[in-house]
Image (spheres, rainbow, N blue to C red):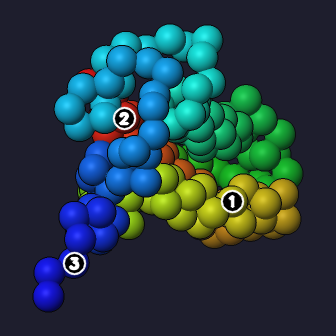
Amino acid sequence: RQPSTRLQLRRTKGTSAAMSADLADSKFTIPVDSENKAKSLNIFSFNFPHHASFHMSWMGFFVSFVSTFAAAPMIAIIREDLELTKPNLGSAGLAAVTGTIGARVLMGSVCDVVGPRYGLSIVLLLSAPFCFCMSYVTSAAGFLICRMGIGLGLATFVACQFWVSCMFN
């Protein structure tokens, strides 16, 4: 026996059809195309699901962006307190960039498997402990590990782009 079309749509992860399967029968307050993607963007609107998704995606990215670059203005104090050398600081910066690149490569697959909303949430939840632990760092190695973990957060960019492209045409 074949499952219903509605059930098949729910089983398809990471596509706009999966995200709007539950909304297929409802009316949208904005014009949408045949795939239920919004045809316009009003940045002052919080209508569900299109504009709410847009705002949630950019806010998630903004949080990870701020956490990634929060250490830069305080680097003079951090360098003095942890007695970091220039090579230590360079290695920490390299670790953050390396973590970001690796996570961005993996994020595309994560978005395909679980969808961009969960992908964004997973990355934010994985990078949050590193942000918290940064205040407890007492060595160069701890600083490097926290910078790499926080750098993973910039993979939210991929999830945000994926999510918005599923919602808007």
Q: Which residue is mark 3?
A: 3
Asked where in the image residue 27 lies, by quadrant, the reply is top left
Q: Closer to the observer: label 1 or label 2?
A: 2
Label 2 Cα crowd, 10 Å radius (few <14 / some 14-19 / many 20+): many
Q: Which residue is mark 2?
A: 167
Instruction: Name the residue: 54% across, 13% down.
Output: 43
Asked where in the image residue 31 lies, by quadrant, the reply is top left
Label 3 Cα crowd, 10 Å radius (few <14 / some 14-19 / many 20+): few
Instruction: Specify which label sits upstream in the sequence, 3 or 2.
Output: 3
Separation of marks 1 and 2 at Cα, in angstroms:
27 Å
Of residues 14 and 78, the one drawn nearer to the viewer in this rendering: 14
**Mark 2 is on which residue type?**
Met
Q: Closer to the observer: label 3 or label 1?
A: 3
Q: Which residue is mark 1?
A: 128
Q: Closer to the observer: label 3 or label 2?
A: 3
| Label 1 residue SS | helix
Left or right: 121, with 73 as reference point: left
Instruction: Specify which label sits upstream in the sequence, 3 or 1.
Output: 3
Left or right: 162, with 93 as reference point: left
Give residue 103's mark: none
Give the residue furthest to the left. 1
In the rendering, at what x and y percent does residue 102 appear? 33, 60
| Quarter occupied by the C terminus | top left
| Label 2 residue SS | helix
Instruction: Specify which label sits upstream in the sequence, 1 or 2.
Output: 1
**Mark 1 is on which residue type?**
Ala
**Mark 3 is on which residue type?**
Pro
Assess whether mark 1 and mark 3 are in contact (beta carbons under 8 angstroms). Answer: no
